[in-house]
Image (cartoon, rainbow, N blue to C red):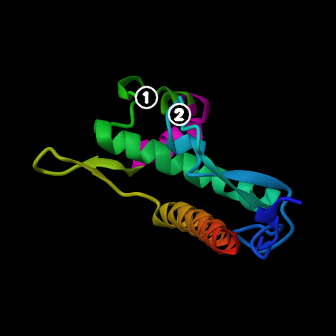
Amino acid sequence: MDPRHLFRDDRLSGICVYCGKHPDTRDHVPSKVLLDEPYPSNLSVVDACLQCNSSFSLDEQYLACLIECVIQGTSESSNLERSKVKRILNENVSLRKKLAASESTNEDGQTLWEPEKERIRNTILKLARGLQHMKCILFLRNRTKLIISHLY
């Protein structure tokens, strides 16, 4: 028997980290849409139900595209650098139009953005919950190693 499993704490496994239901899938934290390839080899995943995992996807796409548009100062996909965001905006005309409608210029010529705050809030809370879960798991794993090392 592997001694690391003697003190294993499974209280945080087997539940969706976002709603507490039974998990059907796993979710990357942070979401891959927020990252460029090559992805980190240690990209974390957490248990999630399909409904939660799917429900965040559009908000995560929105945030990734908004960030790129703000950085580049335009919602015109041909002027964007991230290929993933260009692809999303070329495929999702509705999202492209929403971002374009949220873009304006003030009297000083500065580009201003009026983001959909609820979508940003949803994505930030999702990331926070996922990262907090990973922090708890790492704490429990490190604590188990500490306990086991004192036994020998």
Quarter residue 81 falls in: top left
Q: Which image quarter is the C terminus in?
A: bottom right
Residue 144: % across, % down? 68, 70
Residue sitting nearer the eye, 65 or 116: 65
Q: Residue furthest left?
A: 108
Q: Identify the residue position indicated by label 2 in the image.
A: 89
How many residues crowd mark 1 within 10 Å: few (<14), some (14–19), many (20+)?
many
* In the displayed structure image, the side of residue 62 where residue 144 appears, left or right: right
Does 17 sit above or below residue 111? below
Give the residue at x 81% y 56%. Answer: 50
The residue indicated by pointer 1 is 77
Q: Is residue 61 above or below residue 18?
A: above
Q: Quadrant of the rendered structure where residue 18 is? A: bottom right
Q: Is residue 18 above or below residue 37?
A: below
- Residue 106: x and y in percent read 18, 51
Front one among 6 and 29: 6
Q: Write down the region rendered in magenta.
A: 88-101
Instruction: Tell me if residue 150 is in the magenta stretch.
Output: no
The residue lying toward the viewer, choosing from 64 and 35, is 35
List the single residue furthest toward the top.
78
Q: Is residue 27 left or right of residue 136?
A: right
> Compared to 106, does 148 lie above or below?
below
The reply, left or right, for residue 45 in relation to residue 105 is right
Q: Are marks 2 and 1 in contact (CB under 8 Å)?
A: yes
Q: Which SS does the magenta portion mostly show? A: helix
Residue under the image location 59 percent in, 45 percent down: 43
Query: Which image quadrant: the N terminus?
Result: bottom right
